[in-house]
Amino acid sequence: MIASDAAGEWFSAGAGTGNAQTMDLSDAYREMVRIRVFEEHVLRCAAAGQVPGSVHPYTGQEAVAVGVLAARQPDEWVVSFYRCHGHALAAGVAAAGLAREILGRVGGVCGGKAGSMHIADRSRYLLGASSIVAAQLPIAAGAALAEKTAGSGRAVVAFCGDGAFGAGAAYETLTVAAVLGLPLLLVCEENGWQDHTPSDLVRHRTPGEIARGLGLDCDEVDGNDVAAVHRAAAAALAHCRAGRPQVLVAHTYLRHFHAQLGPQPPGEYRPAAERERWLAQDPLSRVEAALAGPSAEIHEQAAEIREQVTEELTGVFADALAADRPDPASAVTAVTAAAWPPGATWSEAVTVREPVA
């Protein structure tokens, strides 16, 4: 469903209850449309030169974020990577704060200082995102260790792309998780590409094979089927909460490109036949087909939902573009700085700089 927070900003309330093996497909569809339309707005802003830094669109992979995060408990941490906008929205981050953050404006969830790739919102249990491949995984393991130590019964959800399984941090994290029995669910969004390179050219084992080779439970699912993703995630999270780490590989595909830096979108680098095959399995179309049955009524409902969401997000982005940019002095606020030399006591070595008045 879509709900409003105390400030009147619209955010995603999720399409599931945190444990259920089933989900409301209508709610899931609306969530996926919101992510799709949000990202389309971001891409238009990027093409207009209004987004500082890189943009990594999530279009085409919406079923993964929605399906997985509808299965988590609302107070379970989520850790993301540079393709994080869909995860943020599915985790409940307000679209208004997210848009302002990506555009580098006052009122962003991180004060307009984090940009597109480093979104965090602890009020929605989004611990953060990292622009470094696989760097988010040890962070997620640390959060999972904290939950295990506290005996909270909560799991931690981490997302990565298939390229992360070529990084040492992934092997280390999964090994530690297996040895310590961490309540960690690692969701690999396998779209077959690592930047502009086909994954099969730079690996000899798939993420699933690697995870199983390390002795972890691993399930693989059609990442464009939101209901299937949700069922798999709900089952995996139940095991995680019992102290058995899990890996879920969701096979999916990007509608757009890996990344855009600056106003000029990159040219298409993927084979046309491959793109056509995957785009025919678009996750939004899959939900429409599942809801429609013998009736065409869902197509009218789908059009109405997209119109409503588009109107909402058009206003969100108009407000964000009209907002001020952060004061440059705010760059040094909320920063922890270590003093020199090493060996100083904690109180001597660390200062937290308060916001400039």
Image (cartoon, rainbow, N blue to C red):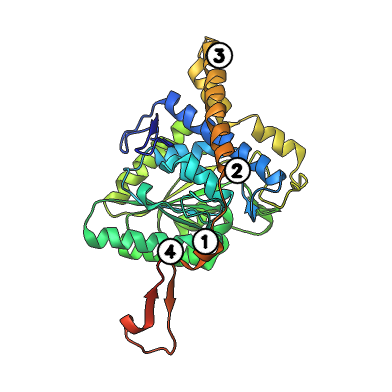
> Does label 4 or label 3 sit earlier along the sequence?
3
Q: Residues within 10 Å of mark 3 (few under 14, many from 20)?
A: few
Label 1 sits on a secondary structure element that is loop
Image coordinates for residue 36, horizontal then vertical, percent: 57, 35
Mark-to-mark CA distance, 2 and 1:
32 Å
Label 4 sits on a secondary structure element that is loop
> Does label 1 or label 4 sit earlier along the sequence?
1
Cβ atoms at labels 4 and 2 below 8 Å apart: no
Q: Nearer the viewer, mark 2 or mark 1?
A: 2
- Mark on residue 321? 2
- Along the viewing direction, whichever of 57 and 120 lies nearer the viewer: 120
Label 2 sits on a secondary structure element that is helix
Q: Amino acid at mark 4?
A: Ala
Cβ atoms at labels 4 and 3 below 8 Å apart: no
> Does label 3 or label 2 sit earlier along the sequence?
3
**Most distant residue in the left direction:** 151
> Does label 4 or label 2 sit earlier along the sequence?
2
Q: Amino acid at mark 3?
A: Glu
Viewed as shown, does residue 51 lie left or right of 343? right
Residue ID for mark 3: 300
Label 3 sits on a secondary structure element that is helix
Quarter of the figure that contains the C terminus: bottom left
Q: Amino acid at mark 1?
A: Ala
Q: Nearer the viewer, mark 4 or mark 2?
A: 4
- Mark on residue 357? 4
Q: Amino acid at mark 2?
A: Leu
Quarter of the figure that contains the N terminus: top left
- Mark on residue 259? none
**Residue drawn at (53%, 21%), measured in percent from left and top?**
288
Mark-to-mark CA distance, 1 and 4:
37 Å
> Does label 2 or label 1 sit earlier along the sequence?
1
> Does label 1 or label 3 sit earlier along the sequence?
1
